[in-house]
Image (spheres, rainbow, N blue to C red):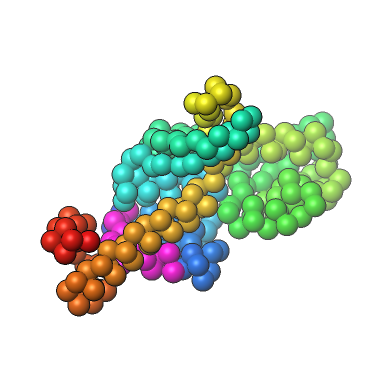
């Protein structure tokens, strides 16, 4: 698959899955943009980078559902009894509808203080996470205008209540950005909340897929002396047929 602007979301073949796994090993920070380019080829690089993080995550979940099916398997540990839990994730149901973005940006006010900002992107979140005060650092990166009365106001001078209000409004406008699962342990019945981060989930799945594909390539290359590229170009059904004939 090679994506071009205007084509819509594309499929990912076996060779590209291995390329994405290679990329995740060599440059983990590049995996998100590479997947997003496949999810939203109708946008250019700058438009994709400017997406609020929840919109980005919704696109990545949609890509995973289209490419590998609407249900994914995940694993967790019960915080109460430490039992291992397997979760079936209905990916389309995990995509949270988001309200329209205000064209002027998010705006909150308390007293004479007013803040107008854009919603955070993935780069904003990553940079703010390195700060000792991540919420304030995030708002500082995303601020368009901060005022007190008719005068500009430094972000550090804004009251904490305004910072909290801005964070709450951002969460309401981009609900996918803070997705949580609510599993219940089958062993002890304990229910708990579990944050879901789509990119680490992709990395785990890519590692499993790469290992499986590499095993198929190794078995067929040993049996038939075919090249990796030719094996990966086959459909999964045809690879499986030859594996059965080879007794692998």
Give the x, y percent position of residue 99. 50, 34
Residue 11 visible, this angle: yes
Question: Which quarter of the figure is the C terminus placed in?
Answer: bottom left
x then y, percent, for residue 109: 75, 34
Asked whether 137 or 206 is in front, the reply is 206
Horizontal relation, residue 60 to residue 246: left or right: right
Q: Where in the figure is residue 77, as x and y percent of width and height?
A: 57, 38
Q: How many marks on residues?
A: 0
Left or right of 235? Residue 185 is: right
Quarter occupied by residue 105: top right
Quarter of image, res 210:
bottom left
Q: Residue at x 76, y 55 (%)?
A: 131
Residue 204 x %, y %: 47, 53
Find the residue positioned furthest to the right. Answer: 157
Would you say residue 12 sits in the magenta stretch?
yes
Give me the residue at 25% from left, 67% from top. 219
Residue 40, relative to residue 116: is it above or below? below
Residue 12 located left or right of residue 197:
left
Q: Which residues are magenta?
A: 9-22
Name the one closer to the observer, 148 or 236.
236
2 inside magenta stretch: no
Magenta span main SS = helix
Q: Considering only vertical position in the picture, is 105 above or below 207?
A: above
Looking at the picture, does residue 177 appear above or below residue 32? above
For residue 38, say whether it is visible: no
Of residue 99 and residue 10, the one placed in the foreground of this image is 10
Q: Residue at x 22, y 69 (%)?
A: 220
Q: Residue at x 75, y 35 (%)?
A: 164
């Amino acid at each position: 698959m090679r994506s071009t602007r205007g084509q819509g979301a594309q499929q990912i073949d076996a060779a590209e899955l291995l390329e994405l796994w290679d990329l995740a090993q060599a440059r983990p920070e590049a995996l998100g943009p590479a997947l997003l380019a496949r999810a939203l080829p109708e946008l250019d690089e700058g438009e994709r980078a400017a997406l609020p993080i929840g919109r980005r995550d919704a696109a990545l979940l949609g890509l995973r559902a289209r490419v590998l099916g609407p249900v994914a398997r995940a694993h967790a540990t019960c915080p109460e009894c430490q039992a291992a839990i397997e979760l079936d994730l209905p990916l389309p149901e995990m995509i949270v509808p988001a309200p329209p973005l205000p064209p002027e940006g998010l705006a909150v006010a308390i007293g004479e203080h007013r803040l107008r900002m854009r919603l955070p992107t993935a780069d904003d979140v990553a940079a703010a996470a390195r700060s000792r005060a991540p919420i304030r650092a995030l708002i500082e990166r995303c601020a368009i205008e901060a005022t007190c009365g008719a005068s500009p106001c430094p972000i550090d001078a804004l009251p904490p209540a305004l910072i909290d209000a801005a964070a709450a409004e951002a969460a309401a406008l981009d609900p996918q950005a803070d997705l949580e699962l609510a599993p219940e342990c089958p062993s002890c019945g304990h229910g708990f909340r579990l944050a879901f981060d789509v990119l680490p989930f992709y990395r785990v799945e890519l590692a499993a897929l790469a290992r499986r594909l590499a095993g198929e390539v190794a078995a067929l290359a040993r049996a038939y002396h075919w090249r990796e590229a030719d094996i990966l170009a086959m459909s999964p059904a045809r690879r499986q047929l030859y594996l059965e004939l080879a007794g692998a």
